[in-house]
Amino acid sequence: MKTLLRDGLTVVALIGFLLYSNWRLTLILFVVLPPILWLIRIASKRYLKLSKGIQETMGDVSHITNEVIGGYQVVKNYGGQAYEAARFDKTSKKNLRQGMKVVVTNSINTPAVQLLMAVAMSVVVWLALRPSVIDNISAGDYLIYCRCRFAQQAGTLID
C-alpha cells in the first residue's frame, strides 16, 4: 500500500509538472496512453489465464508425485512405473508449455509498450524542434521537461 501510494503520488505530481511546463507536448504523450493500456490489459488477461493453468499443472505434478511416493509399493508390485513416469512426464511438459507461453507473452508485451513510448517521445522531440514551439520554450525548460518525462516513464524521480 505504501509503495502504491508513494508511486501513485509521484506519477500524479510528474504529470502535473509536465502539463504545467508544456501542456501541448504532454497531450501528445496522452495520445499513446490508450494503446498502451489496451496492450497491458490484453497481457494481464493472458497472464491471469496462464498463471491459473500453471497452478493447475503444478497441482497435478504434486498430486502425481504424492500418489507415486505414497503408493510406491503398489506401483512397483503391479509394474506401474512406466505408466506413472509417462503420466508425470506429460503433466510436466504441459507445465513447461504454460511457462513458455508466459515468457512469450512477456517477450512481446514489453517491447511493444517500449516501442509505443519511443514513438511518443520521438513525436515530442520532433514537435519540440519545430520553430513555432522552439520560440516558446528555452533549452533548459525543454531539458527539464524531457528529464521529468523519462523519470515518469522509468517510474523514478531523477535528481
Image (cartoon, rainbow, N blue to C red):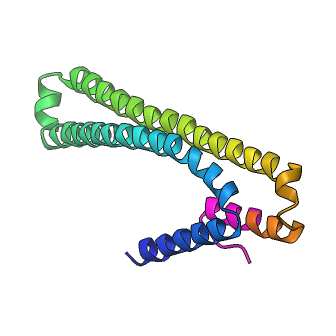
Q: Residue at x 65, y 57 (%)?
A: 26
Q: Nearer the viewer, residue 65 or 78?
A: 65
Q: Nearer the viewer, residue 19 or 84?
A: 19
Please provide percent x and percent y for residue 48.
33, 43
Q: Residue at x 68, y 62 (%)?
A: 149
Q: Quadrant of the N terminus?
A: bottom left
* Magenta span includes 17: no
Q: Nearer the viewer, residue 133 or 125?
A: 133
Q: What secondary structure predominates along the stretch shown in magenta?
A: helix
* Magenta span includes 152: yes
In which image quadrant can residue 23 be found? Answer: bottom right
Q: Residue at x 40, y 43 (%)?
A: 41
What residue span does the magenta drawing correspond to? 146-159
Q: Residue at x 23, y 42 (%)?
A: 59
Query: With 134 as the anchor, is 110 left or right in this view?
Result: left
Above-or-below relation of 37 to 75: below
Q: Nearer the viewer, residue 74 or 49?
A: 49
Please provide percent x and percent y for residue 45.
35, 40
Query: With 93 as the anchor, is 156 left or right in this view?
Result: right
